[in-house]
Amino acid sequence: RTLSEASFLETPGRTRTETCAAALKTTPRVPKRVAFAPKTLSLCIRRVFLFAFVSVIHFPPLFQFSSALETSTMNTMKTKSPYHGVSSDEQKYNQLLFQNVPGFTRSKLKPEYALIAHESRVYGGLFGWTNTLGAYVVSPGMNKATILMTMVSMSTSAKSYVPSPGAWRFAFVLDGQCSIRYRDEDAEAEVTREDLKVGEYFYFPMNTEHEIYTDEKSQCELVMYEAFTKPKLNGTPDEFPTGQKVIVGETDALPNIETPGEIFRLKKLLPQTLEYDVNFHVMDFAPGETLNVKELHHPQHGLVILEGQGIYRLNEDFMPVQQGDVIYMGPWVTQWYGALGKNRTRYLISKDTYRDPLRDSNP
């Protein structure tokens, strides 16, 4: 019913017939309704509107407070308060990065594993290299590691030096470009591969003559792994595998390998044969993807996060990690990863293969 009709219903002394007749004369014709609301509902609606109208006029702070509750999380503070970073201003909050907090680091060294955050790297000269700085992030001086892992920064006209006798060397290009030359024993000739770019990698077996270098216009960033080659299976302690080859490859040119029970993407960079005592895996996780298996095994790992961020479990620690972080995992460390953020996670990880754990434990 219309408000005018309702007002007639409240007029003392009128019969229902008179009320309806007067309402039809004073109220514009409206489309036919299927049903009419009860009298009590009509009165309630009228009183609610009346209360709202009076409240707006006489108690504006009530409505202003309600509006503030709805919009406070969207404010951008304009004040210069010394406590501005504590406010809900999202733009200010996003500037409070962990690495800017004095004395704080996510880096952690435990007897079984280590996390080396980007801000904890210490660069210095590398023995025998020219125009090159390096940061050792994993070495046999920590935990139970038997690998040497180095972040290498080559300036222009830089040259490498040979690894320790009996050690293999693997390097992955992180940025810029470099070239390599090495002795191909099968062809009995020197081979040169120029302008290796991001995502390309190379592996030199033990005692391979080689050189990594940049020209006068190029710079290069590498992550480099080195370790002593382990004796071959079923051989004597001084009997080493033969048949290893120099490997040069491009990560994204490799096919993904099936991983039953898992959803991440996996690429293996070296041949899966008995001659090689190590392999290098590149693993990709979309945001929200995780390792299914909570791994616990003998082979050690040296890992660097190439892209993304997430949570890495190492034994009882669940640690936030991001691009540039390095993780070392010794034998028998519980490990698991979950990718977070808006972009994929990609990491490079080493893994011991095809060697005797008894000799690892009793060299």
Image (cartoon, rainbow, N blue to C red):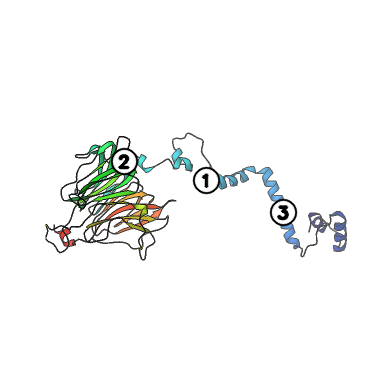
Residue 6 rendering spot, x and y as whole percentages: 79, 57
Instruction: Say which amino acid is labelled 1.
Output: Thr
Give the labeled residue for mark 3: 47
Pick the front one: 214 or 64? 214
Q: Is residue 16 above or below residue 118?
A: below
Question: Residue sitting at 39 percent across and 61 percent down?
Answer: 263
Q: From where the camera sits, is residue 105 visible?
A: no
* Image side of residue 307 versus residue 210, left or right: right
Kind of residue indicated by mark 2 = Cys
Circle 3: is it few (<14), some (14-19), or many (20+) Cα within 10 Å? few
User: Which of the 4 image quadrants contains residue 3?
Assistant: bottom right
Q: Looking at the picture, how far across and down is residue 93, in whole percent?
A: 44, 42
Query: Is residue 222 placed above or below 292 in the rendered structure?
Result: above
What residue did someone put label 2 on? 220
Disc 3 versus disc 1: nearer the observer: 1
Q: Secondary structure at mark 3?
A: helix
Residue 64: image location, x then y, percent: 61, 43
Q: Is residue 4 left or right of residue 273?
A: right
In whole angstroms, how far apart are the C-alphas of marks 2 and 3? 77 Å
Give the foreground label among 2 and 3. Answer: 2
Question: Which disc is residue 73 wearing?
Answer: 1
Mark with earlier residue (3, 1) = 3
Q: Is residue 180 left or right of residue 236?
A: right
